[in-house]
Amino acid sequence: MWKTVLRRVLLMIPQIFILSILVFAVAQFMPGDPFTGLITPETDPIVIENLREQAGLNDPLPIQYFRWLGNALQGDFGTSYTYKVPVSVLIGQRAQNTILLSLVSLVLTYAIALPLGMLAGRYNDSFMDKAVIVYNYVSYAIPTFVLALLMLWFFGYTLGWFPTNGSVEVTLQSGSFEYYMSRAYHLILPSVTYAILGTTSIIQYLRSEVIDAKTQDYVKTARSKGVPEKVVYNRHIFRNSFLPIASTLGYQITGLIGGSVFIEQIFAYQGMGQLFIQSINSRDYSVITALVLLFGIATLVGTLLSDIIMSIVDPRIRID
Amino acid sequence: MAVERPLLEINHLETAFRVTDDYYNAVDDVSLTLENNEILAIVGESGSGKSTLATSIIGLHDPNNTQIKGEVIYKDINLLDLNETLYNKIRGNDIGMIFQDPLGSLNPLMTIHDQIEETLVYHSDMDDKQRTNRVEQLLDQVGIPNPKRVMQQYPHELSGGMRQRVVIAIALANKPPIIIADEPTTALDVTIQAQILDLMNDIQDETGSGIILITHDLGVVAQTADRVAVMYAGQIVEEATVEELFGNPKHPYTRSLLNSVPHELEDENDELHVIQGTVPSLQNLPRRGCRFAPRIPWIPAETHEEDPVLHEISPGHKVRCTCWQHFHFEGEEEQ
């Protein structure tokens, strides 16, 4: 299996190379340049031309591309035009925040979805099942920004239980106990919002898989062995019903890095999604290209991760 | 001195399924006994209620959509009165069950070892090592070569016949006095069928278990069973020893079934006999009169009993209704 994994990793290299060309090209085709927003009609065109020359934006495209690629391979994605800090440092900070938020959200999502999906499937057509279905329809139908705004308005402003923006209280000393508590406190509202939206598909999959699985012959065999019903569900039905969900787990794990544009924007949470939108708005090329490349690599890794996870949970699937 | 009771006694068992809002009997007033060291075959077409009978004995119906009445007496206990916890002590320990489809009846995500071991975990006080030894011994007993390797494999790595042997090993694991086999050979090809039947015969010789063999295949019955009960539309229509049933069949349904078995055709005009119509669905089943009457319309109505019961026409040979006395195949003369 590890041979296959290695081969797949090596295969990623040309894929990433092609991706990098596309990313670079798309960034070039975007109208305007980093200085567009800084220009006033009175600005001397010579000043702008000097700035462009200094930034290397007047060089032929292949030269710009290879310069960018060579630096990127060394971990240098240039400097953000907007923030005036190295892109790698900027992304590093934001990624930390986003991964923390996504990880907590993912755990919450499964903590809510797995029990609800199992119960709804086990007691399908009961009152509880119907309640879960209603919850599912609502969470599926409600747009992210509506739910996020509602949560913010109700729990943040009306009740005042949770902070309404940021990822930490800025006055606190980094590394202190209060600092970490404050971070956790700031996480609650966005992660719960995130989780509520994420549960829908998992509950729906799990419920229908459980309903399907519980009449399968292997479940009858398990029962005829005298296995208690609780174990029948936990060992036999759950594992089989979890398979389709496991196939998406790889993408979810790598998707952690992307963050959610809406949620981060609404909760003013300094994460990757927010950075992405801001960098596009301000034509911050170096940040955009680095982010798109990063998300692309994450997707490739996600595919591989999904295959590896599937081969671990389902003995019928072997990657070789 | 206590009267010796049969190993398993089924009295007036009725199993009803809910269809929309009403309950309909899929098993209707069935009484049967199973003795030690006996293979009792239950024969019938699809939909005659034979599998329902099997799952009722072991208590595996969804309680929300099923009503069960009557008694299933084992060791002086009515199993139908047991709660789930107590029933689970019987299942797998006193009654082993073999299902029809050997691929479907094994969990695709568990190794053969784990699936056989599971039943030992709940019914024996063996430790890990003893259980593994027992699993190996069971696989050997059901004729699986190289049990040590097979134990670590998953169901999809085995052939249909091998899987069915594993299912049998699971049923045998705790040496249950009763084994219920629900169409154990239906999903297998003919040569494998013969091997599995031989295996079941061997097992019975070795263990002395009572086996209830459910099948629609009369060839299987002739090859293995000691006694046969023929079911039609939820009722037993005829019950006899194998020799008696094949040598001297009485009920029109039994005779029609036997006549439908392909045999050497004597001349070109010989046609395979086909029973008219199909088993009626639960809702459309006539609840009064002879249930087989609609499929033999050339037999005069007055020959049927109004409310057919089982008559013991000779020791151990029971036939339902009186229509058999006047039965003849369509186109033939009444004898």
Image (spheres, rainbow, N blue to C red):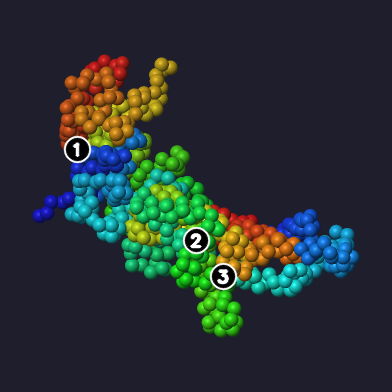
Q: Can residue A66 be seen in the rendering of this structure?
A: no
Which quadrant of the view contains residue A49? Answer: bottom right
Q: CA distance from mark 2 to mark 3?
A: 14 Å
Tell which of B97 and A268 is nearer to you: A268
Q: How would you rate the neighbour count of disc 3 (Cα within 10 Å): few for under 14, some for 14-19, many for 20 or more?
A: many
Question: What amino acid is labelled 3 in the image?
Answer: Asn
Please provide percent x and percent y for residue A9: 69, 61
Query: Residue drawn at (12%, 54%), measured in percent from left and top?
Result: B2
Pointer 3 chain: A
Do the dots labelled 2 and 3 sit on one chain? yes
Residue bearing mark 1: B316
Element under disc 2: helix
Furthest toward the left, the residue is B1
Query: How far is the residue under mark 3 from the one under mark 1?
Result: 85 Å
What's the residue at 59%, 68% (across, down)? Answer: A268
Label 1's element?
loop
**In the image, is B311 to the left or to the right of A116?**
left
The residue to which callout 3 is attached is: A165
Would you name the residue on which mark 2 appears? A150
**Horizontal placement of A7 versus A46: left or right?**
left
Residue sitting nearer the eye, A91 or B245: A91
Q: Residues within 10 Å of mark 2 (few under 14, many from 20)?
A: some
User: Going 87% across and 63% down the picture, which residue do you hit?
Assistant: A45
B291 sits to left or right of B144: left
For disc 1, the neighbor class at 10 Å (few under 14, some 14 to 19, many from 20) is few
Q: Are marks 3 and 1 on the same chain?
A: no
The label nearer to you, 2 versus 1, is 2
State which quarter of the image contains the C terminus of chain A: bottom right
Most foreground residue, A125 or A52: A52
For label 3, the SS is loop
Q: Nearer the viewer, mark 3 or mark 1?
A: 3
